[in-house]
Image (cartoon, rainbow, N blue to C red):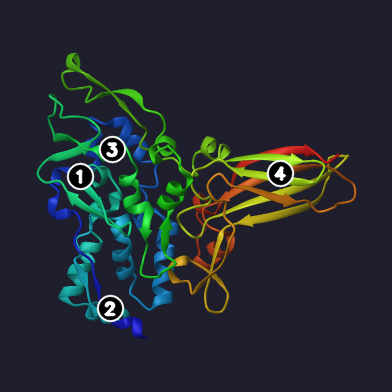
């Protein structure tokens, strides 16, 4: 029960430097309709636990495994999931009160802050666009300086048509990946296995592409604030704010290349991406299923190979990285890596069909966490190919 005495100190990150006019992203849609509509379909919008069953279930699971109040886990994860959270610190008194269902004026105040309506906007416009500067220390840890007043940062210089806010240009919107890596590279929690290494993976690949090149797409021409003085419209080149990932069929299809060495009866699967696949959240898994097909087109056998980082508890049971005692195996695809799969000799098989599927969470972990939302549990076809065995 020693975890009951854990004291969490979390500095307030954002709200003190935010004008109330920016708290509702719907206000931004008046001038940035396309960006707003794309963001509403993104996982950034769903970063709050009320909109994301997998995140909510993960918080509950980690809280139960660490003997902490779920609110403590929420605050730990809020560094990336909800940087607008107002809670400054939570101490052992709060933990005891929550565990024994005792309400005090202090717990009520903290609960109200954690449950504030504006947090349900998730990672919204004024998270990224209120960052003034990003610094990286020698250990690869990022620190942020926030903007004040009514300034909003972006890739463009100040607009003469600004009605709602000032615009300041910042370099991190124009080049590099620092803006993304604030959250997609670093420690997810206090467990040494709760590490997000997408940034290091990408840097090791020596790619010249930025995160936004794949996940925000090519820039397209758009008109800023078209309803304000349209005869003076500013045409800008902007990217999609859907932040595409596994929800994008084309991106999944372009992840792998599959070839077949007929003489050696080996499949070659090549990762075309500049980071690990899967990367990020430790519950993800990619599965390659090989269907052995007879002359009459019947499937006579299957072979499945899973690619994932398998985190385990002390008893060897698979778990989330945040509560893991060890990493049993990690056979994920490294950047641009090729892997060979030797086929099983199956009598009567004349063809194989290879299908690669993506899981946002492995089926076993989904059961343990109680996740049933198909958005997270349904497997997504990435690519499939058919080859003649002879």
Q: Is residue 379 visible?
A: no
Q: Is residue 366 left or right of residue 154?
A: right
Give the SS element for disc 2.
helix
Q: CA distance from mark 2 to mark 1?
A: 32 Å
Circles 2, 4 touching at the beta carbon (< 8 Å): no
Q: In the rendered view, tell whether residue 12 sits above or below residue 133.
A: below
Residue positioned 57% across, 73% down in the render: 317
Q: CA distance from mark 3 to mark 4?
A: 39 Å
Which of the two labelled residues, at mark 2 and mark 4, occupies the earlier sequence position?
2
Q: In the rendered view, tell whether residue 377 sits above or below residue 383.
A: below
Which of the two labelled residues, at mark 1 and mark 4, occupies the earlier sequence position?
1
Q: In the rendered view, tell whether residue 34 sits above or below residue 365.
A: above
- Mark 3 or mark 4: which is in front? 3
The residue under label 1 is 130
- Mark 2 or mark 1: which is in front? 1
Give the SS element for disc 4.
strand
Residue positioned 31% across, 52% down in the render: 182
The residue under label 3 is 173
Q: Hey, which quadrant is residue 255 in on the image?
A: top right
Circles 3, 2 touching at the beta carbon (< 8 Å): no
Q: Is residue 52 visible?
A: yes
The residue under label 4 is 354
């Amino acid at each position: 029960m020693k975890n009951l005495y854990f004291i969490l100190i979390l500095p307030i990150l954002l709200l003190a430097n935010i004008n109330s006019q920016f708290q509702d992203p719907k206000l931004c849609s008046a001038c940035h309709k396309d960006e707003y509509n794309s963001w509403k379909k993104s996982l950034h919008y769903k970063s709050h636990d009320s909109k994301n069953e997998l995140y909510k279930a993960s918080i509950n699971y980690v809280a139960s495994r660490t003997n902490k109040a779920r609110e403590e886990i929420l605050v730990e994860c809020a560094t990336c999931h909800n940087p607008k959270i107002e809670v400054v610190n939570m101490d052992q008194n709060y933990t005891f009160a929550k565990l024994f269902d005792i309400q005090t004026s202090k717990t009520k105040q903290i609960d109200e802050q954690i449950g504030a309506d504006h947090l349900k906007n998730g990672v919204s416009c004024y998270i990224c666009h209120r960052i003034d500067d990003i610094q990286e220390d020698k250990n690869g840890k990022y620190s942020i300086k926030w903007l004040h007043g009514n300034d909003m940062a972006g890739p463009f210089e100040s607009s003469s048509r600004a009605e709602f806010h000032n615009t300041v240009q910042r370099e991190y919107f124009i080049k590099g990946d620092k803006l993304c890596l604030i959250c997609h590279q670093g420690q997810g929690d206090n467990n040494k296995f709760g590490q997000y290494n997408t940034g290091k993976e990408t840097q090791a690949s020596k790619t010249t592409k930025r995160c936004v090149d794949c996940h925000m797409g090519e820039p397209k021409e758009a008109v800023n604030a078209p309803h304000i003085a349209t005869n003076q419209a500013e045409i800008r080149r902007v990217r999609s704010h859907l932040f595409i990932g596994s929800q994008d069929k084309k991106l999944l299809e372009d992840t792998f290349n599959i070839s077949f060495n007929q003489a050696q009866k080996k499949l070659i699967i090549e990762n075309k991406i500049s980071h690990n696949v899967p990367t990020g959240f430790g519950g993800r898994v990619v599965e390659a299923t090989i269907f052995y097909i007879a002359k009459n087109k019947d499937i006579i056998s299957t072979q499945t190979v899973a690619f994932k980082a398998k985190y385990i508890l002390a008893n060897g049971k698979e778990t989330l990285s945040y509560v893991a005692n060890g990493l049993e195996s990690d056979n994920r695809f490294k950047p641009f890596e090729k892997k060979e799969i030797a086929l099983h000799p199956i009598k009567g098989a004349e063809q194989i069909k290879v299908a690669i599927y993506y899981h946002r969470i492995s089926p076993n972990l989904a059961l343990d966490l109680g996740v049933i939302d198909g958005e997270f549990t349904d497997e997504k076809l990435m690519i499939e190919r058919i080859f003649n065995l002879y």
